[in-house]
Amino acid sequence: MSHTEKYIPNPQRYTDGVGYNYCGKSGLQLPKISLGLWHNFGDVDDADEALKMIKHAFDNGITHFDLANNYGTPFGSAEKNFGRILKDHFSSYRDEMVISTKAGHEMWAGPYGDGGSRKYLMASLEQSLKRMKLDYVDIFYSHRYDPNTPLEETMGALSDMVKQGKALYVGISKYPEDKAREAYRILKENGTPCLIYQGKYSIFSRDIEREVLPLASEHGIGFIGFSPLAQGMLSDKYLHGIPENSRAAHSYGFLQSSQITPELVARISKLNDIAAQRGQTLAQMALAWCLHQKQVNSVIVGTSSVKQLQDNIDALKTPDFTDDELWRIGELG
């Protein structure tokens, strides 16, 4: 499709697409798979592929696009590029989309460009709205707990965003359980209940099952998982060493080559065997595994190509896990 042709989304996207789950006890439904723009949507990335991925996502019923102020290289470029795509191709579909962004990690120099202060969060949301050319975001998150700012201040800023109409819902990400409990209480008292908790969740990262998920459930709060493929470790990518274009091959980023140990590769290989017996790729099984947990309303995938995105979508065409499979996967996690 040329850039001049008007984009017409797939008319079957809601009947034949990824499907939806209610987010906690709210009336908002999220697609089972959400597209994350942490990687592959910055200025350094392939703009044509980025556009194709967003169209392909939407054509398959993926309505939720997850961003943060500092996504993309340089910081802010994922929001800016997403804003351009929205304006050029999706302006008549804004109300069919859930767009989320966050602030909490370092974004600009000085004391007001990081953390959980009202000063930083409010300024960051204004910048995000400008970059994406939006009047409001659907979900705004406090991206991490800041021990140097009172929770009343951070949550008060989130509540005011909703009251000002600049965010429809608010959420928190990566908060320790005791702080999450307090955040939920404050937001509820403010009349702007917490919609959602975003946390890391995968076969290799199950800490949230102990406290975060039960607490969210108790308060009727939704949960969305990020890094469901453990930065690509839960795919066939690292079964035979470290490919040169993979995340672990780069000296920057969160996944270092030293993490890909022989012991880990052996576990990945055994998981890969279970996936093969199920007729799936390892990545597909890893995504399906996250979603088998009833409290996981959606998982965020980060993809570098339409082919990879489709592979992830195909994870939903999957047989249910047997108790034996779940036990074996749990032993290797």
Image: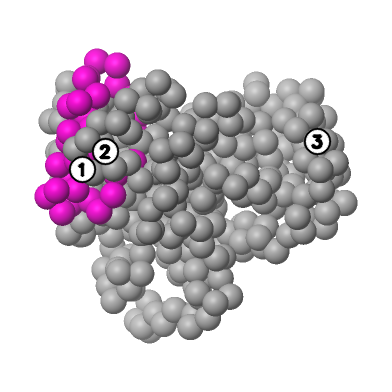
Q: CA distance from mark 1 to mark 3?
A: 42 Å
Query: Is residue 283 positioned above or below 183 on the image?
Result: below
| Label 3: few (<14), some (14–19) or many (≥20) C-alpha neighbours in 10 Å | few
For discs 2 and 3, the disc positioned in front in the rendered view: 2
Residue where numbered disc 3 is placed: 327
Element type where label 2 sits in the image:
helix
The amino acid type found where label 2 is placed reads: Lys
Query: Answer yes or no: do the residues labelled 1 and 2 have beta carbons within 8 Å?
Result: yes
Q: Which residue is mark 2?
A: 188
Per the rendering, the mark at residue 250 is none
Quadrant of the rendered structure where residue 177 is?
Answer: top left
Q: Is residue 279 covered in magenta? A: no
Q: CA distance from mark 2 to mark 3?
A: 38 Å
Image-quadrant location for residue 118:
top left
> Reading the chain from its start, which is encountered first: label 2 or label 3?
2
Q: Please name which of the two marks, 1 or 3, marks the residue nearer to the observer.
A: 1
User: Quick one: 281 or 278, which is closer to the camera?
Assistant: 278
Question: Mark 1 and mark 2: span between their CA atoms?
Answer: 5 Å
Identify the secondary structure beneath mark 3.
helix
Q: Is residue 186 visible?
A: yes
Q: Is residue 72 visible?
A: no
Q: Position of residue 104 (x, y in %)?
A: 29, 31
Residue pointed to by mark 1 = 191
